[in-house]
Amino acid sequence: MKNYTITVNGNVYDVVVEEGAQGAAPVPAKAPAAPKAAPKAAAPAAAPKASGAAGSIKVEAGAAGKIFKIEASVGQAVKAGDAVVILEAMKMEIPVVAPQDGTVASIDVAVGDAVEAGAVLATLN
């Protein structure tokens, strides 16, 4: 085994590397104290919902990210390809578009919400 001291972004790590282990990654022997997290801001306001049942056509996130902007509103008519929500992922703004013509039945997210790939962001009728 070999001992190394590595500094990453000002944090010092002591690592032990076992010789001859194939595919083994260095394991920190002593991790630095985690920086204290800033208190979280108040939760964003609830997302606007349609009164009644949600639509049958789902508008889903193509990638994991954060809701940057909501382009459409409940009751608005949209054409296939019209942006309904703008998703921010990896510092890029990605429009999430209507898969077909319809009327927005519900917006199921709010600006600032973190979403996973495949999450339903809105529904259309």
Image (cartoon, rainbow, N blue to C red):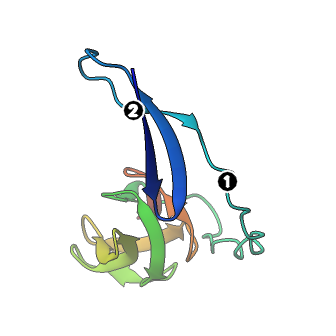
Q: Does 114 appear above or below 32? A: below
Q: Which mark is residue 34?
A: 1
Dot 2: element? loop
- Of 121 and 114, nearer the camera is 114
Mark 2 surroundings within 10 Å by alpha-carbon count, few (fewer than 14), some (14 through 19), many (20 or more): few
Mark 2 vs mark 1: give the one in front.
2
Q: Does 47 appear above or below 61? A: below
Q: State whether residue 108 appears in this view.
A: no
Q: Does 117 appear above or below 22? A: below
Q: Which mark is residue 66?
A: none
Name the residue: 27% across, 80% down: 82
Residue 98 position, x and y percent, is: 29, 70
- Of 107 and 124, nearer the camera is 107
Q: Quadrant of residue 11?
A: bottom right
* Amino acid residing under circle 2: Pro
- Quadrant of image for the C terminus: bottom left
Q: Quadrant of residue 35?
A: bottom right
Residue 105 position, x and y percent, is: 49, 68
Q: Quadrant of residue 2?
A: top left
- Of 74 and 83, nearer the camera is 83
Name the residue: 35% across, 30% down: 25
Residue 14 position, x and y percent, is: 51, 40
Dot 1: element? loop
* Amino acid residing under circle 1: Ala
Mark 1 surroundings within 10 Å by alpha-carbon count, few (fewer than 14), some (14 through 19), many (20 or more): few
Name the residue: 29% across, 74% down: 94
Name the residue: 74% across, 69% down: 40
